[in-house]
Amino acid sequence: MTTTSNDADLDLLVGRMKAAAAPLREVLREIHARFSSHSDGKIADYIPELAKANRDWFGISIVTADGQVFEVGDCKQVFTIQSISKPFVYGMALEDHGLEHVLSKVGVEPTGEAFNAIVLDEASNRPFNPMVNAGAIATADLVKGKDFPERVTRLLSMFSKYCGRDVYIDNSVFMSERMTGHRNRAIGHLMLNFGMVGKEIEESLELYFQQCSVLVSSHDLAMMGATLANGGVNPITGQRAIEQRYVKYLLSIMLSCGMYDYAGEWAYRVGIPSKSGVGGGIVGVIPGQFGIGIFSPPLDAKGNSVRGILTCRELSERFGLHAFESGYTGQRLSDLLTPARRN
Amino acid sequence: MPKIISTHSFRGGTGKSNTTANLAVLVARAGYRVGIIDTDIQSPGIHVLFRFGEEKFKKSLNDYLWGKCPIEAAAHDVTASAIGDITEGSERPRLFLIPSSLKTGEIARILREGYDVALLNDGFQDLLKRLNLDFLFIDTHPGVNEETLLSIASSDLLILIVRPDQQDFQGTAVTVELARKLEVPEMFLILNKVPPGTDHAALKEQVEGMYKAEVAALLPLSTEMARMASGDIFSKRFPTHPLS
């Protein structure tokens, strides 16, 4: 081994120990303990695989834009990414086709409709935004590749770059999603009817079901968030997952449309670009600073993780993380990253 | 505010556990609530100094790390045996010992499975809060490993025990470098087992120059201490001895 890699190993080890002894860990433990007792919410059960989740699972992970990791609870437990995949695949479509072409296929307007509404913009026939199922299917249709296997490989490779590890698909969830995805097929074919998607719509639907079935943990979500917070480069591996110029578009969509039909109140109260999924995950991004990953399966009526929402609200209010906060004088998350000196 | 104090030595046999135990007893006796935690899971030993056999402890640090109990359930009040005459039920002084398991199977299990070292820091913080401690002393495993580094990262003060010996000197340089990287706020050295006839002032100057850190004490090789063979706490048995 070279001296440089030895130094890097040492820095990594020292960083890990400092993170473990930092006050942020105590803060996360306290929040975790407080919200663990919240037993509200219902686990998604539209397919049997999701219903198997344990309602007590609860992991909170925060990764800084320079790669320090703070996490408590079930942060290694994997679950399917579901709708959290949508902004990341949207980023791929932007890289494959550029902004204007993507905008001609999928809008960026929030809708008050449910995520699975069968509704297109009447004037343009476009889906309203890439976070509703219609928009996400149209977005998946834009993922390039010479054939279907290559499109799947590119998709998984993209997620792997964000996570900094190889990712896999939960095959039983994928099979269930495609067996029961009649509504999504209907949306796909409606868009085909309007000429908004290509003839490979069946393949693109398969790709969409695959992207929803990618297995991640709260640690992975925080790493994905940190990659966006770091301008598109995974802070641990140094690998670029998305071109820097597209990051702001992903975050804008997440802020305005990321939390299903709770998105408006989310942007108002919490103000953190975020995306949730029915698997119980939430990813949040504080640009230039942090990625946040939370996992807790019980969902509220709008399909967002109950403990995830509580945790994000608490973090935002307590540390001034709202995107439009200015003149904030309270305690900052960045003050809690190195060991407290008790004097 | 409560303080966490780690004692460490790069090599074994420096008198680390003895020094930690004696310091803890002296501090407690001055009227404080003090905890001593043995994070030397591979080769636990500090309990012996308190004549605290494994038959006496039902729970250990190991149980906490496996999630079987909160850390304070593994804390044993040793005030009466270590300090002696104290008022029944008084808040201060109090001395608590958190031992590591002595059971071969349990040591093997923790070595085989490993554990998340961040849990150790959680445990330190919980002990400070839940036992309302003024000081927590951490007796670490010799050398450099994860629990040692975490203990140093968590500490307000690091005490390095060094013998006047070339192997100790070289190893200690490694620990000092790591401690500086971990940004421990205060660090000093104790030179232990200094042979009779040594020029103390010259040795102190030499060592302070080597590490750019203060030598707080030079302890002579003590035959009285050696004769006790870790059977008791020196400062308790000989409270008026000049070493105490």
Image (cartoon, coloured by chain):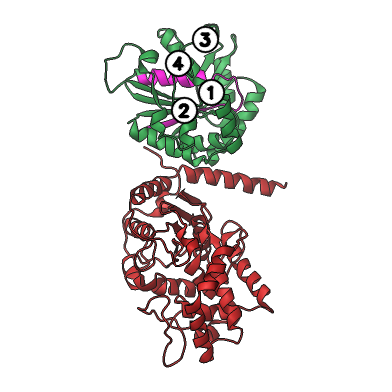
Chain colours: A red, B green
Query: Marks 1 and 3, Cα distance to the nearest angstrom?
Result: 24 Å
Q: Which residues are magenta?
A: B2-28
Q: Taking A256 as reference, is B49 left or right?
A: right
- Same chain check for tags 4 and 3: yes
Q: Amino acid at mark 3?
A: Met
List the residue tagged with mark 2. B60
Q: Amino acid at mark 1?
A: Leu
Q: Taking A303 as reference, is A174 left or right?
A: right
Q: Taking A79 as reference, is A260 left or right?
A: left
- Depth check: give the residue in front, A342 or A45: A45
Q: Earlier in the sequence, mark 1 or mark 4?
A: 4
- Depth check: give the residue in front, B242 or A306: A306
Q: Residue drawn at (46%, 27%), measured in percent from left and top?
A: B60
- Same chain check for tags 2 and 3: yes
Relative height, residue A93 to residue A191 (above, below): above
Q: Residue drawn at (54%, 34%), measured in percent from left and top?
A: B148
Q: Earlier in the sequence, mark 4 or mark 3?
A: 4
List the residue tagged with mark 1. B102
